[in-house]
Image: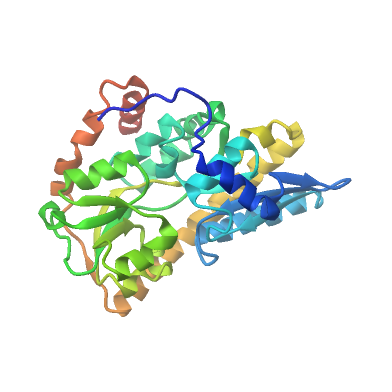
Amino acid sequence: MSWRKPTCRLHLPTRVLFLAFFVVSLVFAACRTSSDVLVIKLGHGLDRKHSVHAAMEFMARRVSEVSGDTIRIEIYPSEQLGTERQCLELLQIGSLGMTKVSAAVLEGFVPSFRVFGIPYLFRDDEHRFQVLEGPIGREILLSGEPYWLRGLCFFDAGSRSFYTKDRPIRKPADLRGLKIRVLESPNFIRMVQLLGGSPTPISWGELYTALQQGIVDGAENNPPSFYLSNHYQVCRYYSLTEHTASPDVLLIGTRLWRRLTEHQQALLEAAAREAAEYQKQLWRESTEEAIRAVRAAGVEIIAPDKEPFMQALEPMAEAYRNQEEIYSLIRRIRDLR
C-alpha cells in the first residue's frame, strides 16, 4: 500500500466551493457574535438518538453553563450541513466551527489517523482507552493542526462488524464476491479487498436505500449504528468480526480556535473531555440495547472465529513498514502495556 503525502494544507475539491455558498444561508459563518455571546455551529451525520449526539448536547449545555451563557454551541445532526467529508472541508476554510466525524474519514486529511484503520490494532477495550485517553491519543488529536483541523476528544465508537442481507459471514471466504459498503477510506477499501469482497464507498445517509435496492449486499459498522439506522430491517445477519475500532473524533477548525481566548479554549477542551467520559457509559448501554433489539427483530447474531480474519488482514499493518510516521505509531500502540 502506498500513500501520497499531502502537498498542501487544504483538502478542497471544487465541489466544496459550491457547498460553502449553498450552506451559507444556514451557517452564515463558523461562529457569530453579538455584544457578548459567541455562537459556534457544529454539524455531524448521526441520528439524534445516537449516544454521540447526546454527548455533544451534554457538552453544549456544559459550555453554556460554565461560560455564563457567553458561548453557545448549536448542533446540526443528520448531515444537515453536509457529509462528514464536506463538514471537514468547511472547517478548513472557516465556514463551520466544529464537527464530529469517524477517524476513518480523517485518513484523507491527516495522515496519522490512518493508524485507526489497521484491523485488530487493539488487544481489548482497556488497551484502546489507554491509547485514546493517553499521550498517543493526544498526539494524534493535535496532528491535524497543520491541516486546519484540531481534535478535541475521541468518542467511543466500539468495534465494527459485518452485516449482510442474504449470506452470513462466518469466515473470510464468505465475503468473496459481495459488494460491501465501506467508508471513504483507503484502509477500509483495502480491508474488504483482502477479504475477497468488493468495497463500495457510499455515504451513510444513502446506505439504507442502497441496501434495499441491492446496490450493495452488506456493510460494516458497530451495533448501535446498525440498529439506529434501521439497517437491521434489510440485513438479517450480523457477524461480530469486530475487525476495527475506529473512534469518532470531535474537531474544531483551527481558524476558529486561534480566534478564541485562552480561557475559551480551556473551557471547550474541558467540556469535550467531560462529554467523552459521559458518552462512554451511554455507549455501553446503547450497544447492549442494540444487540437485544436486533436479535428480537429476527437478526441472526454470529460470533465467528476471529483468527482467520486476523491472519487475512495482517498484511495491512506490514504495508506501512516504509512509512515511518504510521508504522512507528502502530508499533507504539501494540507495544503499550
Q: Nearer the viewer, residue 53 or 288?
A: 53
In this picture, residue 105 sits left or right of residue 25: left
**Can residue 153 be seen from the camera position used here?**
no
Q: Nearer the viewer, residue 298 or 28?
A: 28
Residue located 57% across and 35% down the image: 150
Q: Position of residue 155 (x, y in %)?
A: 49, 49
Which sits in the foreground, 325 or 13?
13
- Could you tell me if residue 55 is visible in this image? yes
**Residue at 39% from the left image edge and 71% from the top image edge:** 230
Where does the image place residue 262, in percent across and percent down from the top left?
A: 74, 32
* Of 228 and 176, the residue lying toward us: 176
* 222 with respect to 169 (left or right): right
Coordinates of residue 225 in the picture (x, y in percent): 40, 62
Vertical side of 7 occupied by 35: above or below: below
Q: Position of residue 256 (x, y in %)?
A: 68, 36
Looking at the image, which residue sits at the far right? 35
Residue found farthest to the bottom = 297
Which quadrant does the N terminus fall into? top left
Q: Quadrant of residue 185?
A: top left
**Dividing the picture into quarters, in which one does residue 295 lie?**
bottom left
